[in-house]
Image (cartoon, helix red, strand yellow):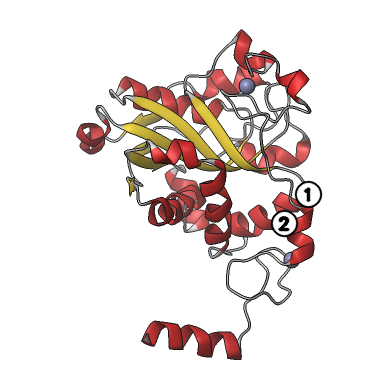
Amino acid sequence: MLRDLARATLDLLLPPGCACCDSPVASPGQLCGPCFQAMRFIAEPLCQRCGLPFASQAEAGRLRLCTACAESPPPWARARAALLYDGAAKGLILPFKHAGREENAAALALHMHRAGAALLAGADLLVPVPLHRRRLLHRRYNQAALLAHALARRARVACLPDALVRTRATGRLGERSAAERDRLMRGAIAVRPGRLARIAGARVVLIDDVLTSGATAGACAQALLDAGACSIDVLVASRVADPRSGRAPRQEEEHADD
Ligand SMILES: [Zn+2]
Ligand SMILES: [Zn+2]
């Protein structure tokens, strides 16, 4: 009750702002009407493997697999994203990632919970994509870990924030081709030895903010599978529309490296 009172007092003094544009909203972490309208939420029909949205049922076909997944399936079973990574989604994600708007994790987790309900329902553990130590020092927090914690609370699934570790810095992946990214990321991520016992046999959902080429998620999934995880799904706040068609657009660069 004290907490509710404190919240009400705080809201009176400092009304909560839209997670995107700061205009007044009813409760913290919410989006205002126009910002909500601008977001492109991903819904069926979508590729059952990577979550890429199809324009129509006809395009989805009977198998509901995109060409990239049919040709070379990723190491994880299913990936789902709440939002298409466009200008509107960037308005929510970039401040979260670079400008210390840590509270946006709650808004993003809300939509990730909806998009990934089926994945979360069967999960034993949530594991965030790790940042390299140097980057973590610079940014102070791992945005994927904040999302994993927020989702763990919402979906009542255990979270293991330090399960994975970057074994080397990989630099910026954004300027590289999909094949080069895969090659660079191979072996760049490992399961922390002290966490091997928790990973063995677990159904893991890997958490990140943006899915770009899938190279980073793929390296994480492979490390978890090698450590004996039973299954790997991927749940992200946002994904680019066509990540595996070669080079990522320039504006994706700041995301693609982590
Ligand atoms: Zn707004
Ligand atoms: Zn696909």
Residue at the spot 67% in from the left edge and 74% down from the top edge: 25
Question: Mark 1 = which residue?
Answer: 87
Question: Mark 2 = which residue?
Answer: 91
Determine whether the residue tagged by mark 1 lies in a helix, strand or loop. helix
Q: Quadrant of residue 202?
A: top left
Report x, y in % for residue 99.
62, 62
Q: Is mark 2 within 8 Å of ligand 1?
A: yes
Q: Quadrant of residue 60?
A: top right
Q: Name the foreground residue: 212 vs 110.
A: 110
Residue 7 placement, left or right of 85: left
Report x, y in % for residue 14.
61, 86
Q: Residues within 10 Å of mark 2 (few under 14, many from 20)?
A: some
- Number of disc labels: 2
Report x, y in % for residue 195.
24, 37
User: Label 1 sits on what residue type?
Assistant: Gly
Residue 101 placement, left or right of 249: left
Q: Quadrant of residue 227?
A: top left
Q: Name the foreground residue: 170 vs 34.
A: 34
Residue at the spot 55% in from the left edge and 39% down from the top edge: 258
Determine whether the residue tagged by mark 2 lies in a helix, strand or loop. helix
Report x, y in % for residue 249.
77, 34
Residue at the spot 75% in from the left edge and 65% down from the top edge: 33
Residue at the spot 62% in from the left edge and 35% down from the top edge: 172
Can I make out residue 243 in this image?
Answer: yes
User: Label 2 sits on what residue type?
Assistant: Gly
Residue 87 placement, left or right of 127: right
> In what quadrant does ligand 2 lie?
top right
Q: Name the foreground residue: 220 vs 110.
A: 110
Give the position of the N terminus as an image quadrant: bottom left
Q: Residues within 10 Å of mark 1 (few under 14, many from 20)?
A: few
